[in-house]
Image: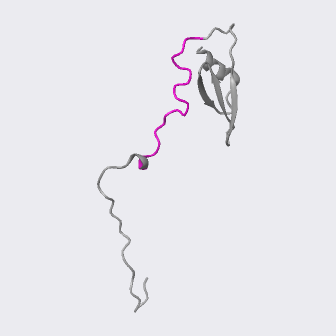
């Protein structure tokens, strides 16, 4: 309630502009950070030697960058080594 003799201040109404929403205002699209990873490669023979390069990326979930077979993928620290190798070997 406004006391007698005190003038109120302007309006608080807001009217949105019509038009196109810019892509930056929509937010990021859910594309994987690592591209296609190992999808689409032939299955790797488990008897053959395979070199992996594992780099610690940090962060609250302890992320790791795994490089193998000419591709790379980012995995959270909670992922099991078996799950990472299943993806690299392309075995379901």
Quarter the N terminus occupies: bottom left
Residue plotted at (40% across, 92% down): 5
Please state if 37 lies on the left or on the right of 2 as rendered. right
Chosen colour scheme: one colour
Q: Is residue 53 magenta?
A: no
Q: Is residue 36 above or below residue 2?
A: above
Quarter the C terminus occupies: top right
Which residue is farthest front?
A: 70
Indicate the position of residue 13 as horizontal and vertical percent values: 35, 68
Residue plotted at (60% across, 26% down): 72
Residue plotted at (35% across, 65% down): 14
Please state if 9 lies on the left or on the right of 18 as rendered. right
Q: Is residue 68 above or below residue 45?
A: below
Q: Which residues are magenta?
A: 25-43
Indicate the position of residue 11 as horizontal and vertical percent values: 36, 74
Magenta stretch, overall SS: loop
Which residue is farthest bottom?
A: 5
- In the foreground, 28 or 70: 70
Q: Is residue 61 above or below residue 88?
A: below
- In the foreground, 72 or 90: 72
Question: How many numbered marks does the figure carry?
Answer: 0
Indicate the position of residue 51 as horizontal and vertical percent values: 69, 18
- In the foreground, 92 or 31: 31
Q: Is residue 75 above or below residue 4?
A: above
Indicate the position of residue 64 as horizontal and vertical percent values: 67, 32
Please state if 34 lies on the left or on the right of 53 as rendered. left
Residue plotted at (61% across, 11% down): 44
């Amino acid at each position: 309630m406004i006391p007698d003799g005190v003038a109120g201040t302007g309006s608080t109404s807001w009217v949105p502009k019509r038009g196109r929403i810019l892509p930056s205002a929509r937010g990021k699209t859910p594309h994987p950070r690592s591209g296609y990873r190992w999808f689409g490669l032939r299955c790797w023979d488990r008897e053959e030697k395979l070199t992996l390069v594992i780099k610690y990326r940090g962060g609250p979930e302890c992320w790791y960058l795994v490089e193998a077979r000419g591709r790379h993928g980012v995995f959270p620290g909670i992922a099991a080594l078996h799950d990472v190798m299943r993806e690299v070997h392309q075995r379901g």
